[in-house]
Amino acid sequence: MSHPDDFLPFLTNESGDMMTEDELQKYCDTMEKTAAWGGQHEIRALSSYLELPINVFLANSAPLRTGEEFAQNGAPLVLSYHLHLYALGAHYNSLRPASSFVDDGESDEDGDAKAGESVDAQERAAVALDNAEAV
């Protein structure tokens, strides 16, 4: 595991104490090998691994920007965070700019919107967050 000191101060064990390196390794193994959902720690680790910034859009809040030190490496990955969108609890969605879609004139298997009908990523995030707030 690389850079455990970057994450240990922010992770606690069940007793509320800072995780040991062994506990952190077990946590990482759980994240890697199970269906456990990630959160902000995993977003930070992904940003560091990819050396790209990641922006998370949240309802009623300014975007959370992670990995700004990698801004010169390319456009940020963009996520939206939904606290109550699905019955499973908090959820992240990946967003892409409309220019990344190719309009092939086809709808998907469910007959949903055509690929070229996407809107700007920030507008999509705003619409998704508005919908999440209505739940």
Image (cartoon, helix red, strand yellow):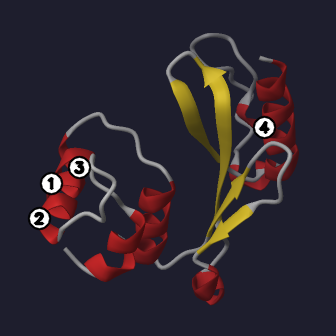
Task: Residue at 56% x, 35% y: name it.
Answer: 91
Give the image location of residue 83, x and y in percent.
65, 33
Give the quarter of the figure containing the C terminus: top right
* Residue type at numbered disc 4: Gly
Task: Residue at 58% x, 41% y: name it.
Answer: 92
Of marks 3 and 1, the one in the foreground: 1
Front position in the image: 22 or 135:
22
* Residue type at numbered disc 3: Glu
Residue placed under numbered mark 3 in the picture: 32
Name the side, left or right, on which 122 lies relative to 34: right
Residue placed under numbered mark 1 in the picture: 26
Q: Quadrant of residue 36?
A: top left
* Kind of element beneath mark 3: helix
> Are circles 3 and 4 on residues that touch, CB within 8 Å?
no
C-alpha gap between disc 3 and disc 4:
34 Å
User: Which mark is first along the chain, 2 or 3?
Assistant: 2
Name the side, left or right, on which 46 lies relative to 97: left
Residue placed under numbered mark 2 in the picture: 22
User: Which mark is first along the chain, 4 or 2?
Assistant: 2
